[in-house]
Image (cartoon, helix red, strand yellow):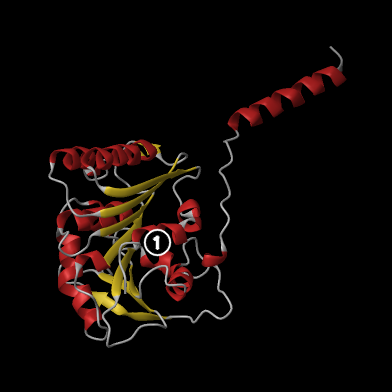
Amino acid sequence: MSRRILGSLLMLGCSLVALGQEKKPATRYKYGPDSEPQAGVPQGTVTKMPPWKSEVFAGTVRDWWIYVPAQYDPQKPACVMVFQDGEWYVNPKGDFRVPVVFDNLIHKKEMPVTIGIFLNPGVFPDKRKGLGKNRSVEYDTLSPKYAEFLEKEILPEVAKKYNLRNDPEARAICGISSGGICAWTVAWERPDLFRKVLSHVGSFTNIRGGDAYPGKIRKTPKKPIRVFLQAGKLDLDNEHGNWPLANMQMELALKFKGYDYKFVMGEEGHNGKHGGAILPDSLRWLWADVKD
């Protein structure tokens, strides 16, 4: 066999190996105008608050931010929306760009005047880096403790300065991954506090027993929760479970019990690209039943 033919075969072999290893490229979702600053739209303010030292999650400290829309009137109570992993959501150039989207939708009256609360998970500052994160404990645990944290600490603190609506239909909670299941857990445990949920690639898997939710939903009397679930076909599949399947199981359980929900499966993986691109539509749907 000539060197030329051998070289061609080797090149062909390498190409086939590379092709076999190549993953299907994820769809690139494009942002619409509601995710970009628009001329003539008044901008709300984002304030980084002093680090919060929690008593409910004893020993933890967390960063957090408050967004106040330009249309906020202290004489009129505003709706509330809480975001887990707040730093990701509050970033105006990140995947979600919540302050920008809020500015545009509130200006067009496509969602009510809403104060945003952006909370990072707690950390233990006295522990070595990498061992002090309390995120999974706070977000993945199936208990009312995170709702208690919001009820007893965060909401009263924000209410010291801003006039907040107390009716649970005017309160929404959102998160990505473990933050998504946390959002659901808060409403599931305390629908008297929150009745609107937005979950991005939610971890309804067996990290800390979250895969039990579809069964719980089916066997529990329907609760007054309105929920938007976003998932991705290329999401995780590991020892904790399969994320696309887990979200589909949630969707089927919600459908079975007649919940007020919307489910959107995209082409992305475990990230905020799809959820961020459809955030304006997600918020329009989530808040459609609430008026100022």
Front in this rendered view, residue 191 or 179? 191
Q: Is residue 191 above or below residue 53?
A: above
Front in this rendered view, residue 287 or 120? 287
- 88 to the left or right of 49: right
Residue 127 visible, this orientation: no
* Residue 24 placement: quadrant: top right
Quadrant containing the C terminus in the rendered view: bottom left
Q: Which residue is mark 1?
A: 283
User: Who's the residue at 49% across and 51% down the image?
Assistant: 274
x and y, in percent, of residue 220 in the image: 13, 43
Kindly identify the amino acid type of the residue bearing the numbered disc 1.
Leu
x and y, in percent, of residue 291 in the image: 31, 70
User: Who's the residue at 20% across and 66% down the image?
Assistant: 168
Please identify the residue farthest to the top as the structure is shown. 1
x and y, in percent, of residue 273 in the image: 50, 53
x and y, in percent, of residue 165 in the image: 23, 75
Other residues around mark 1 within 10 Å, as few (<14) / some (14–19) / many (≥20): some
